[in-house]
């Protein structure tokens, strides 16, 4: 019989996240976009919940993350905030919200903290973001970095391509990670890079690395929850392991509902309200209706 995993109910903070790296405890992270999923994930014991701009593809039907707006992230962030008690809550800064100047970027990030209830923000990019990270940290806004395959750079990269495959580009990724660390980032997402490169970066950094398509040597792992649960409509990326097929479960439940509704077996007596009979007059009265 397998051992039961015990999860702590203690609030996960950034200092505790850094302690996990020191203690070599694996950090777990998933995306969340709404109250019910966020509550389920939080109560399951997940360490970090990311309100990712991936909601553009998983919830809003966009073909990429690029059209996602600050307002759209904010709606989902507020919903997730109402559900989360334990996990560290991080909000993605969407494309365009931090690209036109530090002043507007800080203003947008502050909105996520003050109005949305985020405890940190995530921005994509390496050394080119160092001054912005410093400015955000000066404003007491914790920052999670993101390097490697950065989806907001899809046009610049010419598609969703693995990064750091040559010695030169691998070294550049390591430099990017070190610069983000020195700029004040408390962790960095490594996406779509060879696991050997991710391992080297993880060993060199004092801050945790969170991998997605970066192999086993990172300090933690993140997946898009919809991919993990089989709710995606796009082809499954190589790095995704699907743990459930909720798309088929939901479809099956809906088909069963439709069939039972059409045959009259739903709703049954137990799902219906009934009139109460008056024993004296033998007349049905509506006292019980609606109860």
Image (cartoon, helix red, strand yellow):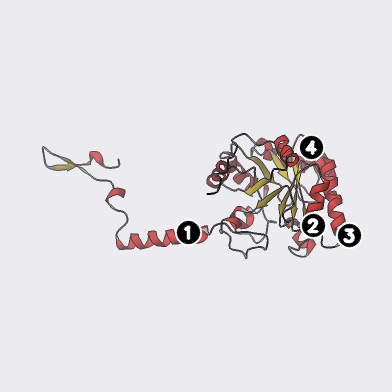
Identify the residue shown where x is 32% and y is 56%: 266
Mark 1 residue crowding within 10 angstroms, few (<14) / some (14–19) / many (20+): few
Which of the 4 image quarters holds residue 102?
top right
| Left or right of residue 40: residue 270 | left
Closer to the N terminus: mark 3 or mark 1? Answer: 3
Report if the CB atoms under discs 4 and 3 are less than 8 Å apart. no
Question: Which residue matches tag 3?
Answer: 168
Closer to the N terminus: mark 4 or mark 3? Answer: 4
Q: Which mark is residue 196?
A: 2
Question: Which residue matches tag 1?
Answer: 249
Q: Secondary structure at mark 2?
A: helix
Can residue 114 be seen in the rendering of this structure? yes
Identify the residue shown where x is 38% and y is 59%: 257
Question: Which residue matches tag 4?
Answer: 137
Tag in front: 2 or 4:
2
Measured in 3D between alpha carbons, the distance from the residue under mark 4 to the one under mark 3, in whole angstroms, is 30 Å
Q: Which mark is residue 36?
A: none
Measured in 3D between alpha carbons, the distance from the residue under mark 4 to the one under mark 1, in whole angstroms, is 44 Å
Percent of width and height locating residue 232? 58, 60
Measured in 3D between alpha carbons, the distance from the residue under mark 2 to the one under mark 3, in whole angstroms, is 14 Å
Mark 2 residue crowding within 10 angstroms, few (<14) / some (14–19) / many (20+): some
Closer to the N terminus: mark 2 or mark 3? Answer: 3
Percent of width and height locating residue 132? 81, 43
Q: Secondary structure at mark 3?
A: helix
């Amino acid at each position: 019989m397998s051992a039961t995993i015990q999860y702590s109910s203690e609030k996960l903070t950034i200092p505790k996240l850094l302690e996990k790296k020191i203690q070599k405890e694996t950090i777990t992270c998933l995306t969340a976009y709404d109250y019910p999923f966020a509550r389920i994930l939080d109560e399951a014991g997940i360490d970090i919940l990311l309100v990712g701009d991936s909601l553009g593809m998983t919830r809003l039907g966009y073909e990429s993350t690029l059209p996602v707006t600050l307002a759209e992230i904010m709606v989902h962030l507020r919903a997730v905030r109402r559900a989360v008690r334990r996990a560290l809550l991080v909000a993605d800064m969407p494309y365009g919200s931090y690209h036109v100047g530090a002043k507007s970027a800080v203003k947008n990030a502050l909105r996520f903290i003050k109005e949305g209830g985020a405890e940190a923000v995530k921005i994509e990019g390496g050394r080119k973001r160092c001054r912005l990270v410093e400015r955000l940290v000066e404003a007491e806004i914790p920052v999670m970095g993101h390097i490697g395959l950065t989806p907001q750079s899809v046009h610049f990269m010419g598609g969703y391509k693995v990064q750091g495959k040559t010695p030169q580009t691998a070294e550049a990724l390591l430099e990017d990670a070190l610069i983000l660390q020195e700029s004040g980032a408390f962790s960095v997402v490594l996406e779509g890079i060879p696991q050997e490169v991710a391992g080297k970066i993880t060993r060199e950094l004092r801050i945790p690395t969170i991998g997605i398509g970066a192999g086993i040597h990172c300090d933690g792992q993140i997946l898009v929850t919809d991919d993990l649960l089989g709710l995606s409509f796009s082809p499954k990326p190589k790095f995704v392991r699907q743990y459930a097929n909720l798309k088929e479960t939901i479809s099956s439940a809906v088909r069963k509902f439709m069939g039972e509704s059409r045959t009259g077996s739903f709703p049954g007596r137990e799902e219906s309200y009934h009139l109460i009979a008056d024993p004296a007059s033998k007349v049905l009265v509506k006292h019980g209706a609606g109860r």
